[in-house]
Image (cartoon, grey):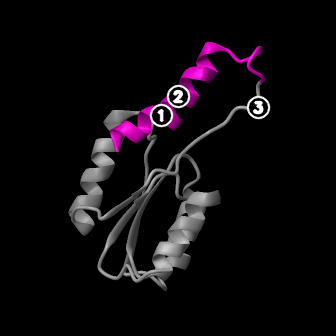
């Protein structure tokens, strides 16, 4: 990994899975890491505590990335704490196991809001 000392990295969906791995990797590389989570505060807190040993600083906040009115305040908090981010990892995403012929419009919209709209918001 590279040296990210003094750099700020924002990771969406950072509390578990690939997002959590990215949080850990950038923290080990010395970055100030800001990540969003949607529901699991406990997982986010545990990850932040582990990573603070390696990173300049870690910030996390609940943010539904599919809702623009939640994204803007999240980014403002990140900028207030660390300044303008240098790196963005648009990781948040969902998949529904329903087959195409059984999927309904509500599931389809939620997948598009999280997987597509959120990328535009950041």
Provide the residue designation for mark 2: 112
Q: State the residue position of label 1.
A: 116
> Which residue is located at x 60 percent, y 22 percent?
108
Residue most extreme to the front: 2
Residue depicted at x 52% and y 58%: 14
Label 3 vs label 2: CA separation?
15 Å
101 to 2, vertically: above or below: above
Q: Position of residue 23 (x, y in %)?
A: 51, 68
Left or right of 25 on screen, residue 84: left
Nearer-the-camera pick, 31 or 82: 31
Magenta stretch: dominant secondary structure:
helix
Whole-number angstrom distance, CA of label 1 to CA of label 2:
5 Å
Q: Is residue 65 left or right of residue 19?
A: left
**Disc 2 on helix, strand or loop?**
helix
Of callouts 3 and 2, the N-terminal one: 3
The mark that comes first in sequence, 3 or 1, is: 3
Q: Position of residue 119 (x, y in %)?
A: 41, 41
Q: Position of residue 92 (x, y in %)?
A: 53, 47
| Disc 1: CA contacts within 10 A as few (<14), some (14-19) or many (>=20) | some
Distance from disc 3 to disc 1, alpha carbons, whole Å, reads: 18 Å
Magenta stretch in the rendered image:
99-122
What residue is disc 3 on? 97
């Amino acid at each position: 990994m590279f040296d990210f000392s003094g750099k700020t990295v924002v990771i969406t969906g950072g509390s578990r899975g690939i997002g959590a791995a990215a949080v850990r990797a950038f923290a080990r590389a010395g970055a100030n890491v800001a990540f969003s989570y949607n529901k699991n505060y406990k997982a986010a807190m545990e990850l932040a505590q582990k990573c603070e040993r390696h990173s300049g600083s870690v910030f996390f906040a609940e943010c539904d990335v599919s809702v623009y009115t939640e994204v803007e305040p999240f980014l403002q908090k990140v900028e207030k704490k660390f300044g303008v981010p240098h790196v963005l990892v648009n990781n948040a995403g969902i998949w529904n196991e329903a087959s195409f012929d059984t999927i309904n419009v509500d599931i389809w919209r939620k997948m598009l809001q999280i997987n597509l709209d959120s990328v535009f918001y950041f």
